[in-house]
């Protein structure tokens, strides 16, 4: 009986060690990336949000042509600007190879 239990216990221990090696250790290696990446991403997102909001407000204060039926134009400009900004960020991410 003891001989049958040893290979099973060894197999269970091997699976536990493999799972620990493939899950916990890579997560520990992500620590420095997450430590600076998450706050950096939040800061970049807030900066982009305020930049787009500034473009919108600048368009709304553009003059008398923004009234009546043309009041949607500043929003179109802001959405277009945000799409261009997203495209620029996507190209930068793609260029860096990450």
Image (cartoon, helix red, strand yellow):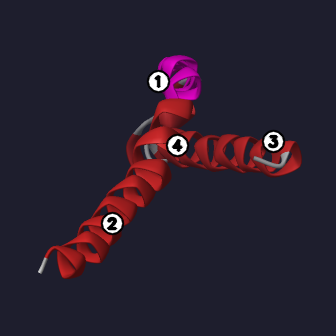
Residue linked to disc 4? 26
Q: In whole angstroms, how far apart are the C-alphas of marks 3 and 2?
A: 48 Å
Q: Earlier in the sequence, mark 4 or mark 1?
A: 4
Looking at the image, can residue 9 be seen?
Answer: yes
Q: Of tags 3 and 2, which is closer to the observer? A: 2
Spatial CA span between label 4 and label 2? 24 Å
- Asked which secondary structure carries label 1, the reply is helix
Q: Which mark is residue 92?
A: 3
Q: Residue at x 72, y 41 (%)?
A: 89
Residues 4 and 16: in front is 4
69 on left or right of 51? left
Which numbered dot is residue 42? 1
Total marks drawn?
4
In magenta stretch: residue 36 = yes
Element at label 3: helix
Q: Which residues are magenta?
A: 30-55
Please state if 97 lies on the left or on the right of 79 as rendered: right
Q: Marks 2 and 1: which is nearer the front? A: 2
Q: Position of residue 14 (x, y in %)?
A: 39, 63
- Residue 10 disc label: 2
Q: Gap between marks 1 and 3, in whole Å?
A: 17 Å
- On screen, residue 54 above or below 97: above
Instruction: Nearest to the eye among marks 4 and 3: give it.
Output: 4
Q: Position of residue 31 (x, y in %)?
A: 50, 25
Q: Quadrant of residue 65?
A: top right
Q: Which of the two labelled residues, at mark 4 and mark 2, occupies the earlier sequence position?
A: 2
Circle 2 crowding by C-alpha within 10 Å: few under 14, some 14–19, many from 20 = few
């Amino acid at each position: 009986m003891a001989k049958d239990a040893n290979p099973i216990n060894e197999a269970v221990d091997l699976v536990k060690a493999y799972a620990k090696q493939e899950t916990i250790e890579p997560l520990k290696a992500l620590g420095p990336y997450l430590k600076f990446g998450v706050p950096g991403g939040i800061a970049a997102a807030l900066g982009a949000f305020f930049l787009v909001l500034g473009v919108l407000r600048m368009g709304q204060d553009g003059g008398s042509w923004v009234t009546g039926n043309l009041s949607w134009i500043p929003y179109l400009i802001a959405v277009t600007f945000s799409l261009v900004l997203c495209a620029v960020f996507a190209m930068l991410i793609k260029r860096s190879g990450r």
